[in-house]
Amino acid sequence: MPELREVPNEGPPFLGTWRRVYIGILIYLAAIIVVFYVFTRAYR
Amino acid sequence: MRPLDWIVLVTTLCSIVAYGLYRSRGSNTVDRYLLAGKTMPWYAMALSIMATQASAITFISTTGQAYADGMRFVQFYFGLPLAMVVICSTVVPVFHRTKVYTAYEYLEQRFDSKTRVLGSLIFLLQRGLSAGMTIYAPAIVLSAILQWPERTTTSLMGAVVVTYTVLGGIKAVTWSDVQQMCVIFLGLVIALVTVLVLLPSSVSFGDAVYLAGAAGRLNAVTTTFQWSDRFNIWSGLLGGTFLFLSYFGCDQSQVQRYLTGKSIAQSKLSLLFNAVAKIPMQFFILFIGAMVFVFYLFIQPPLLFQQAELLRIQNRPEFAAIQQQYDRAYAHRRDAALALAQERRSGDGAAEARSKAEYRAAEKEFDEARTQAQSLVSAAGGEKGFTDTNYIFLTFVTRFLPVGIVGLVIAVIFAATMSASSGEINSLATVTVVDLYRRFVKRGASDHHYLVASRWATLFWGVYAVAFAGIAGRLGSLIVAVNKVGSLFYGTLLGCFVLAFGFRRVRGTATFIGMLVGEAAILSTAQFTDVSWLWYNPIGCAVVVVTALLVTALSPGGASSAIPETQRAG
């Protein structure tokens, strides 16, 4: 079985660093939970 | 199904298979067959990951769940972005740098061969059982709705999946998944638009959302905590995170998708796309179910959506009284819903509150009649704890959607089954060949030999999945146990990988003992407590880690090992 080729490790295409991308994802999660909570309250 | 529906269904399925096979040409070496030669772009991996996770029962069951219980199931996915961030920052770079074909191959590099074998066997057992269920579960629903024999449905889906998976390998699987997800998105959008168009002209979109909310069907976030409750914000954030860490970090059916990436960044992007897109997608599917609920406020639904069970109870002496109560409750609920929609528009707050109370009382009365019918099924010798939620959406589709669209939605169900099943079969074959056959049976053979072995292993697991689906109906209540099988094993695997990535001092024997104790802890929890299955993963993971750390601390010289730079996270 051939050894797999080395793949490059690039930066993200946006926000500069992966750390910032991960923080962006966590902010997105918090925002979506808030939106769903407001949605639930509004139509309860 | 009318001729146009058949044309849409057959054309859609044929084009998916043909496109997958066309894109898979050149898969003539084992690294291309199993990992696409590490050439895949992020968007193809992203859609393949999404397609592999979303089985047909996800669409059938999720919409039915929103109809019956509301949208709180969406909270199950709150842990997904957290898990994806952890996996992208730890697991993905290490798996790429160590050049492994499978997640369990890494376990031998980090620990030893027995830990690798145990991890591989746990995966084969757990994924092997679910591979049959992936085909069987939608087949029973499709067969009941379309009046097709179960064997025909399972054989048809199985034959198509096995053909393109054996011939094209992971490239065929991935590119077919891409097309399948496009069909699934298209089908879902058309289903939602159609259900809104079918609402009475006096009911606006705003009214529909309001009526669904007033009946408790838009409960996307619930904050109350109970150990036995699967879907609240806490079980979603904590239990869901552990489940998705296990699924995307330790399950080869997912790991293999992102190992095909042409760079580490592309693999990360494919996972992060899912972190962002999955929650809105599930919300959308649940919203369709909530709108189907509103549709059935104005068109009387059958007492039970599963026709066979309805026939079973029709000769029972209690049936006539339940049906009468149900008819009355339906008329009461319909009138109350129309009155509430009217009061809402009038702007009279007090009258609206009165109408809402009346509507909720009517809804309760309606639910009680249905619950009585469901209990009657159990009393008449049917399944204990019978529910018909899996039949709600497809009953709606086949009875009310226009010709052509029915064929498209049935194609969505087929596409979802095929995408989930092909990913499972492909990964089962990979683990069989890489972790067992190449490691213990035939070492150092030619590339061509392993390519042929991979094709045979794929064929074996495909035939096995179809055969298991064929006998699944005879397993009776075991089916329920099989559905939970993923959670029975994921915690152990996750604990093993947490030790691999997070605890440099822990060695193979300690991990192996930890896995055995962890598995025993999960099985005991499932057998002797009523703790929801979503909590099995954190419990199992914690027991594995604590046990391995204790064994390491108690063993002489256990603290002296270090792991190579390539195997470190970061």
Image: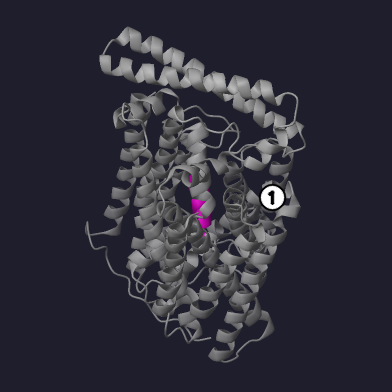
Q: Residues within 10 Å of mark 1 (few under 14, many from 20)?
A: some
Above or below residue A44? Residue B404 is: below
The residue depicted at 29 percent of the width and 54 percent of the height is A21
**Residue that mark 1 sits on:** B479
The residue depicted at 40 percent of the width and 9 percent of the height is B354
Q: Left or right: where does residue B523 sit relative to residue B390?
A: right
Q: Left or right: where does residue B252 sit relative to residue A29?
A: right
Residue B177 coordinates in the image, percent (x, y): 43, 65
- Letter of the chain that mark 1 sits on in the rendering: B
Q: Left or right: where does residue B38 sit relative to residue B107?
A: left
Quadrant including the C terminus of chain B: bottom left
Above or below residue B61? Residue B135 is: below
Q: Left or right: where does residue B206 sit relative to residue B411?
A: left
Residue most extreme to the top = B350
Task: Say if the magenta span includes residue B280.
Answer: no
Q: Nearer the viewer, residue B115 or B224?
A: B224
The residue depicted at 71 percent of the width and 48 percent of the height is B523
Residue B63 coordinates in the image, percent (x, y): 48, 42
Task: Say if the magenta span includes residue B248.
Answer: yes
Q: Nearer the viewer, residue B200 or B428?
A: B200
Magenta part of the chain: B240-249
What type of secondary structure mainly makes up the magenta span?
A: helix
Q: Nearer the viewer, residue B562 or B236?
A: B236
In which quadrant of the rendered view does residue B283 lie?
Answer: top left
The residue depicted at 47 percent of the width and 70 percent of the height is B173
Secondary structure of the residue carrying numbered label 1: helix
Q: Report whether residue B283 is seen.
A: yes
